[in-house]
Image (cartoon, rainbow, N blue to C red):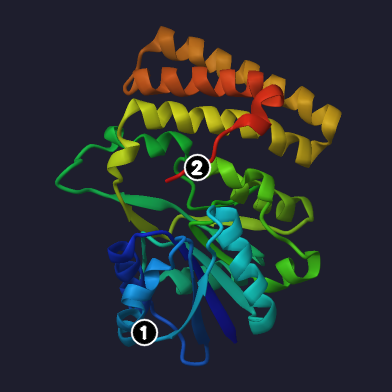
């Protein structure tokens, strides 16, 4: 069995090294042939500075690629193109700053056997650091799916920071990430996996298919929160149209806009814990969806 791990990176060398060390520690059966693709998305191919070290420290073969055109969509489509030559049985998608749980593969194969899953995903757990000890300081939690107390459930889409999937899905349907979402810095994976779900493939979220990520200081301020909420609101219109068609998608977009406005009012009235960031998120998501059909093409590139 051949498995290929795909990672895109942009000037986070220390985080990437930690990620690869965690991959070295994953429990893996001897019959599995594992290799890794790393796509460097820096203009000057900065990963070359540590290439030798990464090769030396890794237990597995690493294929290095360079995508100088900035953006996660271009970088991810770069490894999808390379996968055509490798033709693995399964692929894994990780972010360059994640730490992979050592029993990750065990849980993935268990989910496949029990539920006949085509795609497996799981939670991203934030590691506390000396800079940030409270969950509420990390506004990323506002944008992540919360499946409450469920251990395993079938879902409609997944984030590409924690994915195990049958490669035949991509090969058969000639899938790629949508270039129109490249400038947003978010959302391209939602559309990608929503399409897979629409084709009838089963996506399962498993509580034990875990990756870990550190807090990012740039995600702990209201400017980042408003920018992220606005971009998700605007691109929501585009995703809805891709999923449901032009007319139905427009109707659904404005229905969801009303939903966020109602949540905005509820957040003000209830004033529960973390109410202020929830008020901001709901109002800006409402506004983003409201103006999305008119401003989608004018969004500037997310240079982070």
**Residue shown at 40%/38% (left/top)?**
141
* Image-based side of 141 in relation to 109, left or right: left
- Residue closer to the observer: 114 or 10: 10
* Image-based side of 11 in relation to 83, left or right: left
In this rendering, the answer to whether 215 lies above or below 12 is: above
In this view of the protein, can residue 110 be seen by the observer? no
Dot 1: few (<14), some (14–19), or many (≥20) neighbours within 10 Å?
Answer: some
- Residue closer to the observer: 163 or 74: 74
The answer to which quarter of the image holds residue 81 is: bottom right
Q: Which of marks 1 and 2 precedes in the sequence?
A: 1
Q: Position of residue 239 (x, y in %)?
A: 70, 38
Q: Which residue is mark 2?
A: 147
Q: Which residue is mark 1?
A: 55
In this rendering, the answer to whether 129 lies above or below 101 is: above
Query: Which residue is the extreme one toward the bottom?
Result: 31
Residues at circles 2 and 1 in contact by the CB criterion of under 8 Å:
no
Dot 2: few (<14), some (14–19), or many (≥20) neighbours within 10 Å?
Answer: some
**Residue shown at 54%/24% (left/top)?**
285
The answer to which quarter of the image holds residue 56 is: bottom left
Q: Which mark is residue 221?
A: none
């Amino acid at each position: 069995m051949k498995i290929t791990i795909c990672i895109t990176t942009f000037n986070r060398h220390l985080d990437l090294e930690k990620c690869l060390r965690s991959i070295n520690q994953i429990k893996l059966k001897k019959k599995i042939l594992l290799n890794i693709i790393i796509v460097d998305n820096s203009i000057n191919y900065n990963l070359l500075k540590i290439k030798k070290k990464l090769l030396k420290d890794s237990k597995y073969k690493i294929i290095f690629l360079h995508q100088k055109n900035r953006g996660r969509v271009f970088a991810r489509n770069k490894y999808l193109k390379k996968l055509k030559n490798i033709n693995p049985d399964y692929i894994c998608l990780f972010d360059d700053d994640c730490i992979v749980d050592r029993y990750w593969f065990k849980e993935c194969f268990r989910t496949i056997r029990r539920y006949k899953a085509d795609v497996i995903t799981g939670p991203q757990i934030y590691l506390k650091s000396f800079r940030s000890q409270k969950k509420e300081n990390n506004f990323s939690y506002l944008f992540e799916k919360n499946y409450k107390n469920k251990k395993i459930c079938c879902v409609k889409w997944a984030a590409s920071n924690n994915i195990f999937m049958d490669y035949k899905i991509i090969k058969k349907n000639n899938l790629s990430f949508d270039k129109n979402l490249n400038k947003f810095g978010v959302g391209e994976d939602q559309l990608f996996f929503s399409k897979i779900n629409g084709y009838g493939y089963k996506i399962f979220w498993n509580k034990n298919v875990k990756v870990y990520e550190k807090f990012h200081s740039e995600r702990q301020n209201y400017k980042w929160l408003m920018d992220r909420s606005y971009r998700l609101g605007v691109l929501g219109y585009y995703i809805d149209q891709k999923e449901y068609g032009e007319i139905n998608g427009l109707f659904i977009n404005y229905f969801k806009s009303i939903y966020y406005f109602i949540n905005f009012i509820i957040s003000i009235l209830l004033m529960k814990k973390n109410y202020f960031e929830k008020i901001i998120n709901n109002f800006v998501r409402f506004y983003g969806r409201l103006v999305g059909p008119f401003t989608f093409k004018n969004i500037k590139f997310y240079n982070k």
